[in-house]
Amino acid sequence: MARSSSPPTERTPLVTPQPGTEHVVKRGWFPSLHRVLFTTCLLALTFAFTQTSLMYGFRRMTCEDYYLHHPDAVEPVPDRCTVRRIEADTASSISIMATSTMTFSEPSTASLMCAR
């Protein structure tokens, strides 16, 4: 295989094309950055719709766990989960989940905006 005199670049093909075949670069309708931003926005929108049920689920699990470990606790009449300790544990669980989601999600919108 003959080597060319120019150094390889990002556009240098890894496999030499056969003679007579053309290499056509297909472009999408939108640039990649806009597709990523749209996907990120769509995911944030879906989280906004599921946030209420997610908070309710965390609250129920925390409430059940609280009364599992505190069987002698007096339950409030209208809602047994309206205890400060349950509310605080629910809030900390949701904040841990949100922090880990933002930390380990890829790519984050903030990093894309800073890259411009």
Image (cartoon, rainbow, N blue to C red):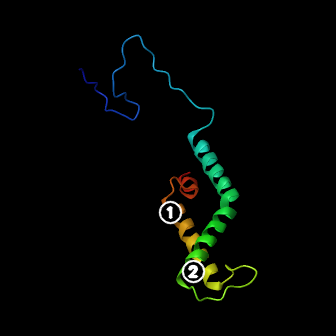
Image point (49%, 21%), residue name: 24
The residue type indicated by label 2 comes to Tyr
The 10 Å Cα crowd at callout 1, few under 14, some 14 to 19, many 20 or more, is few
Using the rendered view, name the quadrant where residue 73 is placed.
bottom right
Rounded to the nearest whole Å, what is the CA distance between mark 1 and mark 2? 29 Å
Apparent side of residue 16 relative to residue 58 in the rendered image (left or right): left
Using the rendered view, name the quadrant where residue 94 is placed.
bottom right
Apparent side of residue 4 relative to residue 103 in the rendered image (left or right): left
The 10 Å Cα crowd at callout 2, few under 14, some 14 to 19, many 20 or more, is some
SS of the residue under disc 1 = helix
Residue 71 lies, with reference to residue 40, above or below; the image says below
Image point (59%, 32%), residue name: 28
Task: Say if mark 1 contacts mark 2, CB within 8 Å.
Answer: no
The image position of residue 115, as x and y in percent, is: 53, 53
Would you name the residue on which mark 1 appears? 103
SS of the residue under disc 2 = helix
Residue, far left = 1
Q: Nearer the viewer, residue 6 or 103?
A: 103
Q: Nearer the viewer, residue 28 or 68?
A: 68
Image point (31%, 32%), residue name: 7
Using the rendered view, name the quadrant where residue 18 is placed.
top left
Q: Nearer the viewer, residue 102 or 88?
A: 88
Q: Nearer the viewer, residue 8 or 104?
A: 104
The residue type indicated by label 1 comes to Thr
Would you name the residue on which mark 2 appears? 66
The image position of residue 35, as x and y in percent, is: 60, 42
